Image: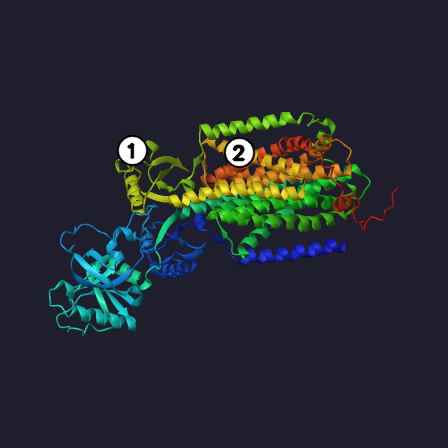
Amino acid sequence: MTRATTVRAVLAAAVLLVSVFITLTMSPRLGLDLQGGTRMVLQAKDSATVAADRETTDRTLEVLRQRIDSLGVAEPVLTRSGEDRIIVELPDVQDPRQAAAVIGRTAQLSFHAVQGAAPPGTDPESKPESKPEPESGSEPGSDPDPAANPEKSTGRLLLPDEQGTRLDLGPTRLSGAGVKDATAFFEAQQAAGWTVKLDFHKDAGKDWTKLTGEAACHPAGDERRRVAIVLDEKVISSPQVDPSVGCQAGLPSGGTQITGSFTAKEARDLALLIKGGALPVPVEIVEQRTVGPTLGAAAIDASAQAALIGAAATALFITLVYRLFGALAAVALAAYGVISYAALVGLGVTLTLPGLAGFVLAIGMAVDANVLVFERAREECQDRPTRSLRSALTTGFQKAFSAVADSNITTLIAAGLLFFLGSGPVKGFGVTLAIGVIASMFSALVIARALTEIAAGSRFVSDYRGVNGIARPGSVRTWLTRKDPQLFRKPVQWLVVSTVLVAVAVAGIVVRGVDLGVEFTGGRLVEYSTSRAVDVETARSTLADAGFGDAEVTTAGDGDISVRTGKLDNDGEYALRTALATEGGETTKVRDELIGPSLGDELRRNALIALGVAVLVQLAYLAVRFRWTFAVGSVVAMVHDVIIVVGAFAWLGRPVDGIFLAALLTVIGYSVNDSVVVFDRVRELWAGNRKAPLATIARRAVLQTVPRTVNTGMGALFILVALAVLGGDSLADFALALLIGIVVGTWSSVFTAVPGALLLERTTTAPPPVPGKSSRRARAPRHDPLDNGARV
């Protein structure tokens, strides 16, 4: 065993030991879509006096944290996203109505002098302080338009008191910031019922004494002897100053009490809001997602089963194809699973449902590097049958490295776009995919290489060619060599076939239309599970009778009911659920997604930007690494794949949402990956034989890389079929998009990218590539220390 092999083996053992330790001692951090709960995205809004920037959003976040902590939610998570958004995660909260009500209220508490009754002629029923309805249909605290309330802009308020009498209030004399503490208690002695007691800070207490002292200068019974306590522009209490209080004397500065026929819950909520403090700026709920615990548990079980079955099928397949070396690659694949899982847990990555699917998918894609190496080693053994097994294996690793690096970099680009341009759980898919790519490279280039080099040093493995798996060409390679099909005599005919496929896909998009999910259109999508079976027509009729005639009702999962509506707040959702329960009995909310129109527009725009950036970045990278003609051919094939996948979903009537976007960007990475492998071989062969026709070089390159493409695709297909069958509705569309993408991508990398590049090469006068250092190193591998060079 050489020194390099020893270093790789020691490094692999050390990383595996650390990974096993992390796996056994740490638990994964599950996202709300796996553990169940509610996730809200709050948009901070400018008020009349304060702009919603990073600083005010941070202060708003801290106020919200105090409010949510007081609700008793276990381990809530609040983080700022960007400059003016706050993400709130509430584990195990299935009915977010109370949380949304507490979060959304601005809790702007103020104390005012009453200047008298409102002037005659004002409508006592009008409410100049009322706010416009928020676009998302939730219960946010939105700031009123000052132009619609001229009294507020001049410092005056015309508000009804507790009995509906309209009062003319002076400017704010004391704000909620001066309140030190607020507690709810039951006042039995004076029969006041539930009351909220306020304790002031020192300076605020003096202002309170001064305010009540001025009010005491007016005669008893006069409206001006009252002090109005206003919360969110609603008078919650307007008591008269006691007749025993003298003019300018005022009430004691320690505090006061708010009475108002409160229930116990109302008093506690009011105390909570006042104690938590006023929000520096109003907030609006632009996104709200609720997932039941059973859905998350089912997704975890389904993903685990798909991972085990798919990984076992993949391991069995590569063992049958590559014999002993395939079995060693399967061991490295198992090590990859442990390392990538440990990396996710150790780095504290939140594992979401798309992220879980990405972890499972990466298992199937992790064999790609091993397949590339083994196929190159087979070629070396076929070209030079007398060379040692170890030498052929070393050359295989060296020649395959550039293709492995390029293909993984293109996948990392797709993962980066998912992270930076995706939203919510889709970001988790990008992180998981990136970690999987890095772990797979370590698995192939360190673990699998150490194992195969140790095995190659054995005389038994070296002598018995049928055992090691790479000393003899595979059946696919043998068949292609015997048939030697002339693929690119007429490259235009392949482009015509691809054009027809694209035309069919575009027809589906135009005729059937793309069913954009609620994530891209805005609105609300709720999935219910009922104790009694309810068919769609009955559910639709029941909801129409309850006033939800515009709701789209469909089936979901195992007999569940899915309801999609436009604007619907939390109270409306409760009413909808109650109506459905009249037919279905006990009705449980399985999944709930609320997206505001503004956020839907933003997500749809970001999705288009992500696709556009993906095309441009991949084009730029490929243009640097390859000839521009190869880069354009690869990007044309990539766009071809994207259009066909979207068109297939249009014909099938499947929804296009954030998870579909994650699948589409993964298809882009996979498509470019396949094209990179083919063009990398074209470049190598053309540099070695610059006078040969490019069509002949391309044919040889395709025939040499087809075994790799087939074997790698089979590994991914095993995983995706398992996900499609076992993953349920949550993962079925994701797996379906990738299944279509991999099949189409395999076709386009050969019959779209290569013919396109051949046609473009006819328009350029650039010379063939010059053999580089990497080519010379590939032709003259390092000396094998176990091979003394002697030949008989």
- Image quadrant where residue 629 sits: top right
Relative image position of residue 211 (x, y in whole percent): 21, 69
- Image quadrant where residue 565 sits: top left
Q: Which mark is residue 135?
A: none
Of the residues shown, which amino acid type is indicated by label 1?
Answer: Ser
At horizontal 25% and vertical 54% (from top left) the residue drawn is 150
From this view, report whether residue 619 is shown above or below residue 31: above
Residue 465 visible, this orientation: no
- Earlier in the chain: of badge 2 and badge 1, it is 1
Relative image position of residue 61 (x, y in whole percent): 39, 59
Q: Secondary structure at mark 2?
A: helix
Front-most of residues 28 and 652 = 652
The residue carrying mark 2 is 643
Q: Give me the C-alpha separation between circle 2 and circle 1.
A: 38 Å
Assign the C terminus to one quadrant of the image: top right
From this view, report whether residue 550 is shown above or below residue 35: above
Front-most of residues 273 and 491 = 491
Q: How is the image coloured?
A: rainbow
Q: Which mark is residue 541?
A: 1
Q: Secondary structure at mark 1?
A: helix
Q: Is 583 left, or right, of 37 in this rendering?
A: left
